[in-house]
Image: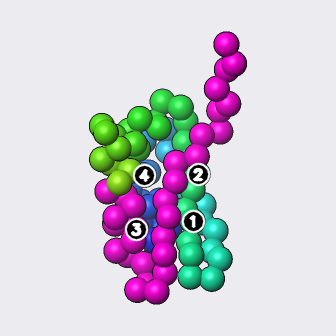
Amino acid sequence: MPLELVTFITQNLVADPDALKVQAERRGYDIRIEIRCGKEDAGRIIGRGGRVINSIRTLARAAADGRERVDVELVSDQASPDN
């Protein structure tokens, strides 16, 4: 349930939903949800001061079973250039 909720929320936040990938990895009672998106949409998911991503985390934890621990992370596919 948390994966579907995070997917629904992020699809409605980004400008390019085709570039969005939301995946979950389960280990026992731990669920790690990774959000991958285009570089332009990362700011929309993070929000000002991290408010949006923190709200997504809160909602995902609330949607989980009482025993499950949910972690939501925005993963960058782009390596930063070395200058």
Residue 43 visible somewhere in the drawing: yes
Residue for badge 4: 10
> How many C-alpha atoms fall within 10 Å of the one at disc 3: few (<14), some, or many (≥20)?
many
Mark 1 belongs to which amino acid? Arg
Residue for badge 1: 32
Mark 4 belongs to which amino acid? Thr
36 horizontally vs 9: left or right: right
Q: Up-down: is 1 above or below 58? A: below
Q: Tell me the SS state at disc 4.
A: helix
Q: Up-down: is 29 above or below 76? A: below
Residue for badge 2: 21
Where residue 76 sits in the image (x, y, percent)? 60, 40
Residue for badge 3: 60
Distance Cα–Cα, label 4 vs label 2: 9 Å
Q: Tell me the SS state at disc 3.
A: helix
Distance Cα–Cα, label 2 vs label 1: 14 Å
Distance Cα–Cα, label 1 vs label 3: 11 Å
Distance Cα–Cα, label 4 vs label 1: 16 Å
Q: Which residue shows up at 33% across the image and 48% down it?
A: 52
Nearer the observer: mark 3 or 2; the answer is 3
Where residue 26 sits in the image (x, y, percent)? 63, 74
Q: Tell me the SS state at disc 1.
A: strand
Mark 3 belongs to which amino acid? Ala
Where residue 73 sits in the image (x, y, percent)? 52, 54
Q: Up-down: is 83 above or below 3? A: above
Question: Which span of residues is magenta-colored?
Answer: 55-83
* Mark closer to the chain start, 4 or 1: 4
